[in-house]
Image (cartoon, rainbow, N blue to C red):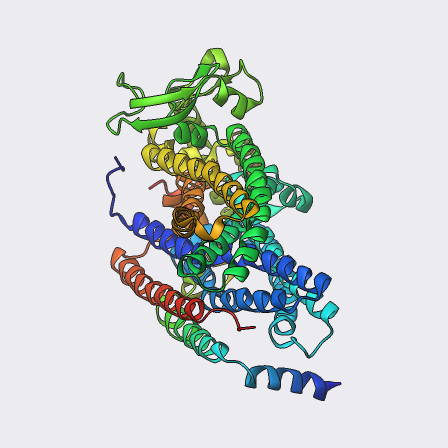
Amino acid sequence: MVEQIDFSQVNWARAQFALTAMYHWIFVPLTLGLSVLLAFFETIYVKTGNEAWKRLTKFWMTLFAINFAIGVATGIILEFQFGTNWSNYSWIVGDIFGAPLAIEGIFAFFLEATFFAMMFFGWDRVSKGMHLFSTWMVAIGANLSALWILVANGWMQNPVGMEFNPDTARFEMVNFAEIIFNPVAVSKFTHTTSSGFLLACLFVVGVSSWYLMKGRHQLMAKRSIVVASVFGVIAAAYVGFSGDEAAYEVSQQQPMKLAAMEGLYEGEVNAGLVALGVINSKKIAGDTQEPFIFSVKIPYALSLLANRELGSFVPGIDDLVFGNEEQGIESGASRIAKGKQAIAALAAYKEARNNHDDVASQQALGQFDAYKSNLGYGYLESGADAVPPVATTFYAFHIMVALGTLFPLIFIVLLYYIYKGELENAGWLHIVGLCCIPLAWIASETGWVVAEVGRQPWAIQGLLPVQVANTNLTTGTIQTTFFMFLFLFTLLIIAEFKIMLTQIKKGPEED
Amino acid sequence: MLYSVYSFYRNGFRSMTVGKRLWLIIALKLFVMFGVLKVFYFPNYLNTQFDTDHERTNHVIEQITMVR
């Protein structure tokens, strides 16, 4: 099913990055979503003056604090890896990433950190209104932090607002607004934060279902479920809407990723969306094998999703690898030839500059400018090298979508049972609610698998493949730190799990 | 003013229950990350291998023009 693993040095560096990013992402979405839910809970407390809502808010705030404390700074390890394992990449993009990450540090993180102490220490020490304001500020700050990181990630998927400076070997920012309002970054931000909201709602539902199952703190559990389910339905709708927008942007900027998400090899007009399918893992670009062992498609839906037009053409992997003249799609081989011209021109430019030969350097620069949009393809050996792991991308995408479709239905059923006053007795629904916890994280992680595995081999879309972005280190060095991270993060997860479980068993303060 | 901020934090930290264990985890984690991993395993490659930006640029240009 899953592609054969290549244990070369670059792949160890990729595996290490993926491992740390996925562990980091266990903590982040809960912080993003639970912070907003806390603000809702506390708003209800302030509005009603009912102390039960205060106890409820404080309980979820404790779980939020545990998650925040264990998860905080785990993302910094990714920055360590940039400097060590991905030194070419970090040099090349330093000018672009510097600004959004600095803004994150100065603005969002400090906003969040300033109000954090107020939120935790301020109960009964500051006014209700001030405390509520702090809780909202923590929620806004946490989500703004995500904005800057996602702007950086969006730029890697769709590099805009920059120029490559051959004298410094860096992409330099020429239009900050274009980078911030990059449509890929915008859709990534809305989709990622709303999926965090959804995950937190499912977490609250899961923990509350456990209380109902045990017959403890039932009123608090039901109140929590009502707020989480109402917000969950809204968040799920927004996840769907932003997901549609994200898929549209993928189709426009990263058509190969979309083809992999759908296991689409031969492009089609009126293309159908695979609702269910088993990929033929032996299939490779250009051969005559069927791409699926079994599949069920929704007619026209892929054309609609990709181009917002029913009868439109959606390119497949074969079209993008071998070209399709009729549809005006250039072949990978042609782009590779142009990319090699760009690399040769860059080398010639550097040599001419070293020799102080202005005429030759200008000629080389002209040549480079003509071919630079295909620079990254020059590092590939064949068009097929631009194909991401299809099975991984396909399954991750379909698991995410299936779960994303299931979650709002669960919220609606929960709300229905609460409305009917039968939630305490619906044991099967408590089990479903509890199962929501792992399912929420599976959906969230698979979303990132689609985003990141689906854009391989590119570190920067079309401009820099991963094998050129990384540092020439020995594989052993990366393997050592890979296992150290595995150990460290596993310890943290166990700590989070144990402390949270203890706190959940303890429950909220009694009346 | 400064004293009230100080006492706000002091009282806050004193009244923590689960928070003390969390601060311990945060401190240990930051020590492992910055005191061990960053120092011994994650040097900034270009900063440690080269002294000037000019040398770093030349190295990166060499890397990206040498097709692997």
Q: Quadrant of the C terminus of chain B?
A: top left
Q: In this rendering, is residue A318 above or below A88?
A: above
**Is A182 displayed left or right of A466 in the figure?**
right
Query: Residue A415 versus residue A97: which sits nearer the camera?
Result: A415
**Is A179 displayed left or right of A268 in the figure?**
right
Residue B15, how many percent across, how many down?
56, 83
Can residue A392 be seen from the camera position used here?
A: yes
Query: Residue A429 versus residue A373: which sits nearer the camera?
Result: A429
Q: In this rendering, is residue A106 above or below A313?
A: below
Q: In this rendering, is residue A481 above or below A29?
A: below
Residue A345, how many percent across, how many down?
48, 35
Can residue A463 be seen from the camera position used here?
A: no
Query: Residue A388 versus residue A42: which sits nearer the camera?
Result: A42
Query: Residue A208 versus residue A494: which sits nearer the camera?
Result: A208
Q: In this rendering, is residue A17 above or below B41?
A: above
Q: In the image, what residue occupies the spot 51% across and 59% down?
A: A221
The number of discs equals: 0
**Is A425 displayed left or right of A482 in the figure?**
right
**Is A102 displayed left or right of A379 in the figure?**
right
Residue A235, how many percent across, how many down?
57, 44
